[in-house]
Image (tube, grey):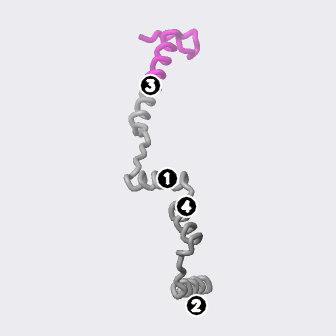
Amino acid sequence: MAINNINNAGKPTTVDAKQTAQQQQQVSQQQSQAKSAATPAARQDAVSITPQAQQLGQLTRKASSESGIDQAKVDKVKQALTDGSYKVDVERLAAKLAEFESDLYGR
């Protein structure tokens, strides 16, 4: 209950000041509740990697860890060159050279 005091010349009394402070606090609480209700809940991001991407990652790691040279095949060719059993198919070699030049120069 508010007590009007004529001598205060319009200044709120202690009771009025307390009620005003409580009302302001209630209004601010209501506003903050309204804001939190209007704001959607924060979503957490999630990442999922497809099986194809996982396989690609595995292949990339495997390729980077290996030299890319088939050492068994290199040893086999070296042995064939050493003992003279390596035969060059001249026709196939010429066709591959012509194909390469055609690709290179766009003819």
Residue 80 image point, x, y percent: 54, 70
Q: Mark 4 points at which residue?
A: 69
Of 28 and 43, which appears nearest the observer?
43
Q: What residue type is labelled 4?
A: Ile
- The image quadrant that residue 75 belongs to is bottom right
Circles 3 and 1 in contact, beta carbons < 8 Å: no
N-terminal label among 4 and 3: 3
Quadrant of image for the C terminus: bottom right
Q: How many neighbours does mark 4 have within 10 angstroms: few (below 14), some (14-19), or many (20 or more)?
A: few
Label 3: which secondary element: helix
Is residue 20 rendered magenta in the image?
yes
- Measured in 3D between alpha carbons, the distance from the residue under mark 4 to the one under mark 3, in whole angstroms, is 71 Å
**Marks 4 and 3: which is nearer the front?**
4
Q: Mark 2 points at which residue?
A: 107
Query: Left or right of 48: which side holds 90?
Result: right
- Measured in 3D between alpha carbons, the distance from the residue under mark 4 to the one under mark 2, in whole angstroms, is 32 Å
Q: What stretch is highlighted in magenta?
A: 1-28
Is residue 2 rendered magenta in the image?
yes
- Measured in 3D between alpha carbons, the distance from the residue under mark 2 to the one under mark 3, in whole angstroms, is 79 Å
Q: Mark 1 points at which residue?
A: 62
**Marks 3 and 1: which is nearer the front?**
1
Of 59 and 13, which appears nearest the observer?
59
N-terminal label among 2 and 3: 3
On screen, residue 36 above or below 21 = below
Q: Which residue is drawn at 42% across and 46% down?
A: 47
**Marks 4 and 2: which is nearer the front?**
4
